[in-house]
Image: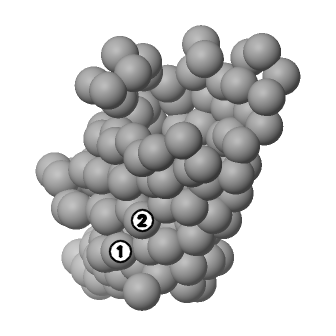
Amino acid sequence: MQFALTFVVAVATGLFAGISDSHAATIIGTWNGGGTVKLTNGEVEKVRCRIRYEEGSGRTFIIYANCSHANGTFQQSGRVVRRSSSSYSGSLYSDQYSVSGDVNISVSGKRQTLSAKSAKGSARITLTKQ
């Protein structure tokens, strides 16, 4: 009886882990969209971004962001960690502006909302998976 119970728990745990991993995999790939950046001086700029996620190790994903605004383009990269099947958090860094910040991502199907904050401002971007 104990063997059967252990087997059922092991199978159930494996099944739920598989479901969680398949939801996590939805972040991998390319996402496009736009939003706004609010600088600490109060200026607000519209941005368009193309963001790509690659699988890292465990629950970690590598993020590459290319964004454009009225004054040019900028790139950022970083890592995010899966916190649940639909949320991720981590950090981004821009060599161009020598700034790093925190990022939080919420995913629902083929849509995601990305919020970022650094010493120079904050951003909120809505993206769809390509």
Is 46 on the left-hand or right-hand side of 86?
A: right
Q: Which mark is residue 30?
A: 1
Say which label, 2 or 1, has the lower sequence index: 1
* Residue depicted at x 30% and y 62%: 53
Is 16 on the left-hand or right-hand side of 115?
A: left
Is 82 on the left-hand or right-hand side of 3?
A: right
80 up-or-down from 49: above or below: above
* Residue depicted at x 16% and y 50%: 57
Which quarter of the figure has residue 22?
A: bottom left
Looking at the image, the residue that sits furthest to the left is 57
Assign a secondary structure to mark 1: strand
Please tell me how crowded label 1 is: few (under 14), some (14-19), or many (20+) other residues with Cα within 10 Å: some
Between 26 and 77, the one lying in front of the other is 77
Spot occupied by residue 55 in the image (x, y as percentages of width and height): 20, 61
Could you tell me which quadrant the C terminus lies in?
A: bottom left
Assign a secondary structure to mark 2: strand
**Residue 31 visible in the picture:** yes
Spot occupied by residue 59 in the image (x, y as percentages of width and height): 30, 52
Q: Which residue is mark 2?
A: 50
What's the distance in space between the residues labelled 2 and 1, CA to CA? 7 Å
Spot occupied by residue 81 in the image (x, y as percentages of width and height): 39, 45
* Residue depicted at x 37% and y 52%: 65
Amino acid found under the numbered disc labelled 2: Arg
Q: Which mark is residue 104?
A: none
Is 9 on the left-hand or right-hand side of 110?
A: left
Is the Cβ of the residue at disc 2 closer than 8 Å to that at disc 1? yes
Between 104 and 87, the one lying in front of the other is 104
